[in-house]
Image: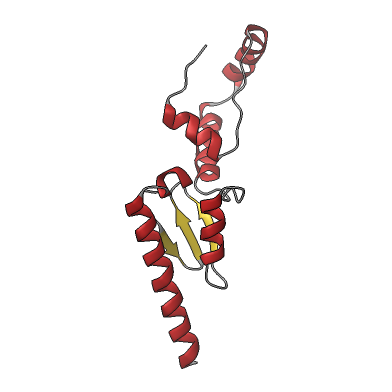
Amino acid sequence: MTTLSYSQQQLLKVLQISPVKLTDAFASQLLPAAESEPAQSSSDNITSLKIELQSVAPDLSQLLAQDIAAALADGLNWQIEPAAVHSHIDQYQLLTPPLLALQRAEQKKALWALLSGYEKSSSEQSSHE
């Protein structure tokens, strides 16, 4: 049985994925089909998996996620980007690292500064229109 690292366990928790045990019968059934597929198909699968993992919806059952959602300016959407190191805003999308990383004090301060700066700039733009 494969043992998962702490970071792998946290990623599975954030993505709300439960690992399953692969039985020998299942593995032997997949081998012939996998060999007959072209190599490009597996690289396409990897690419689509990377695209799917780029951003995920936050788990709003967690208190920190609820606080962040409440602090979002009107029209700003929020997604968690598992590979992100810092929070940033891309167009009308707030992209943050996983909630576990956001629990560190420096990450929280940077996030609140980003959100308050965005709110000020968006309110200034609407007052000029």
Front residue of 31/9: it is: 9
Asked if residue 85 lies left or right of residue 16, the reply is left
x, y percent for residue 92: 51, 68
x, y percent for residue 72: 52, 67
The vertical placement of 14 against 25, above or below, is below
Asked if residue 41 lies left or right of residue 33, the reply is left
Residue at image location 58% in from the left, 50% down from the top: 57
The vertical placement of 125 against 94, above or below, is below
Residue at image location 48% in from the left, 34% down from the top: 10
x, y percent for residue 45: 55, 34
Q: Is residue 57 visible?
A: yes
Residue at image location 61% in from the left, 28% down from the top: 18
The vertical placement of 67 against 55, above or below, is below
The vertical placement of 91 against 9, above or below, is below
Farthest left residue? 106
Give the quadrant of residue 36: top right
Front residue of 105/41: it is: 105
Front residue of 63/15: it is: 63
Residue at image location 52% in from the left, 42% down from the top: 53
Question: What colour scheme does the image use?
Answer: secondary structure
x, y percent for residue 43: 50, 33
Q: Is residue 86 visible?
A: no
